[in-house]
Amino acid sequence: MRARSERGLLDGHVLAEDPPRDRAEPVGRPGGEDPVAGGVALCAQAVRVEDLAHRERGRRRRVHDAHSRTGDGGDSPDSEPFYTWGTLLPMLAEADLLDLDPFDGLCVGSPAPPVPSAPLPTGNWGLLRAEVEADGLTLTGPDGLVFRAHGSAGRFRSVTPASTALTLSLPASTSTVRIEVPWPVRMATVGGAAVEMSESTAAVVPPGAAGRTLVIERG
């Protein structure tokens, strides 16, 4: 068996060990020492991996290993039929918009949203969903709107919906941000100081640095 360091790596797929080869064949890059043969071999490998990907999608699998000669996947006893790392990138994109952070709690929004919307199942608040809008973002839950931010799609941290109030840590802003909730507001404060109200269901937050705490109390 060749050392693990000599196994091929192409397009995120670790190529499984080859069957025993003729000892006269050079071991190293595909095609041995011939650069032209090496290029042809790499193209052939790419075709095999692409063919494998199409076949495995049809089987609703994403295998852990693909054989470097046959292109077959899942032929190793320790190979997984569904390689869960394949879902990592889309999960990271959604987490950039909506996530439960171990330090900052529920976080919503992104300065540069990678996706237009993201769901997040939670224990206390049920299934939440963040939606990017033209001038901000919306967070909804099982009972409808949690809050809508106009004028900022930045990262709102420590978002805490409760029966008596909505509390969140604001992102930095250079202009006024309007935070709308689905219920009548009794009072809204930023850092303990009252802020202007817009109608009876929204708080108008002045520009400021990140980390200020907004509390919107239910009327």
Image: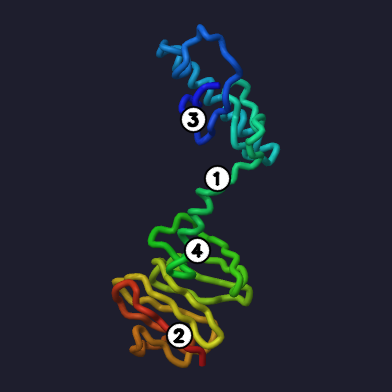
Toward the right, the furthest residue is: 59
* First reached walking from the N terminus: tag 3 or tag 2: 3
* First reached walking from the N terminus: tag 4 or tag 1: 1
Residue 150 located left or right of residue 82: left
Number of the label disc, if any, that sits on residue 85: 1
* First reached walking from the N terminus: tag 4 or tag 3: 3
Q: Residue at 57% of width from left, 68% of height from top?
A: 128
Please name the amino acid that badge 4 sits on. Answer: Asp
Q: Residues within 10 Å of mark 1 (few under 14, many from 20)?
A: few
Q: Residues within 10 Å of mark 4 (few under 14, many from 20)?
A: many
Q: Which residue is identified by label 3?
A: 9
Q: Nearer the viewer, residue 200 or 130?
A: 130
Q: Which residue is identified by label 4?
A: 99
- Circle 3 or circle 2, nearest the eye: 3
Secondary element under disc 4, as helix, strand or loop, is strand
Q: Nearer the viewer, residue 85 or 4?
A: 4
Real-space CA distance between mark 4 and mark 2, rounded to the nearest whole angstrom? 22 Å
Q: Which residue is identified by label 2?
A: 216
Residue 45, x across and y down, in percent: 53, 23
Please name the amino acid that badge 3 sits on. Answer: Leu
Residue 136, x across and y down, in percent: 43, 68
Please name the amino acid that badge 2 sits on. Answer: Ile
- Circle 4 or circle 2, nearest the eye: 4
Residue 87, x across and y down, in percent: 56, 48
Q: Residue at 52% of width from left, 26% of height from top?
A: 46
Secondary element under disc 2, as helix, strand or loop, is strand
